[in-house]
Image (cartoon, rainbow, N blue to C red):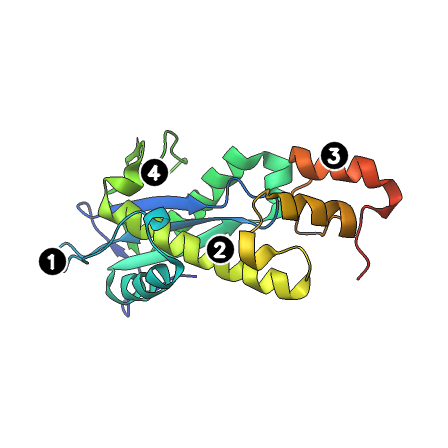
Amino acid sequence: MNNHGEDGPAQTNILTAGVDEAGRGPLAGPVVAAAVILDPANPLVAIRDSKQLSAPQRECLSARIQAHALAWCVARADVAEIDRLNILRATLLAMQRAVAGLSIRPGRVLVDGNRCPNLDCPAEAIVKGDQKVPAIAAASILAKVARDREMVELDALYPGYGLARHKGYPTRAHIAALYEKGVTPHHRRSYAPVRECLAARGPCAEPLE
């Protein structure tokens, strides 16, 4: 998911992209990353770390970011990639895809956390960057909103797990549902609670369609 300028991808040496992710901790669903280049001439107010905002606030700001940013892209790594690569490498892959999908090439990239993906431009990791850098905060909002929407869709496909409520995180209710109903194709089998459920349920681990 991204936007593209009318004249196609542009080159610049001065613009900064902020990058953040959502969904490293959950037992189910993809990890989602976003990259955002804000317009220095038109700063957006009220942009802050997605975790400090309510869901309606995030939805409103997500729409504003998409409408007013110079460029943005949301990308993902799916459950199969998470299980194959591990969550850190899958997260970096999603970030790499988000930056690659920008319609404007940034002069540098600022990434939330302490690790950067491999990019073809200078990049810097900033611990708690979503609290310090508006472009990273904007990326955190886009990533969170996109992932939450996907988990609501999965909840409709797999009712009874509470995915729309807890977004796949390992709550007591979620783990209890795994043991009661089984492990869906969207659960991360490399994560210990899911792996333990598979071992405990044996042939009954997969839910009935």
Locate the N terminus and report the quarter of the image it occupies: bottom left
Residue at (35, 53) in percent of width and height? 141
- Furthest toward the left, the residue is 41
x, y percent for residue 44: 19, 58
Q: Which mark is residue 41?
A: 1
Task: Please determine whether, in this image, residue 165 is positioned above or below residue 135.
Answer: below
Discs 1, 2 touching: Cβ within 8 Å: no
Image quarter in which the C terminus is found: bottom right
Of all residues, the one furthest to the front in this rendering is 172
Which is more toward the observer, 182 or 84?
182
Q: Is residue 113 visible?
A: yes
Q: Which mark is residue 94?
A: none
Q: Residue 32's x, y, as percent?
A: 47, 49
Residue positioned 24% across, 59% down in the render? 70
Mark 1 / mark 3, whichever is N-terminal: 1
Judging from the image, what secondary structure is the residue with disc 1 in?
loop
The kind of secondary structure element at disc 4 is strand
Judging by the rendered image, the residue that carries numbered circle 2 is: 147
**Which residue is tagged 4?**
112
Label 1, label 3: how far apart the Cα atoms are? 52 Å
Return the x and y of residue 2 as percentages of the image width and height: 39, 61
Marks 1 and 4: CB-CB under 8 Å?
A: no
Residue behind mark 3 = 196
Tell me where residue 120 appears, x and y as whole percent.
Answer: 34, 39
Q: From mark 2 to mark 4, how far is it between C-alphas?
A: 17 Å
The three-letter code of the residue at mark 1 reads: Ala
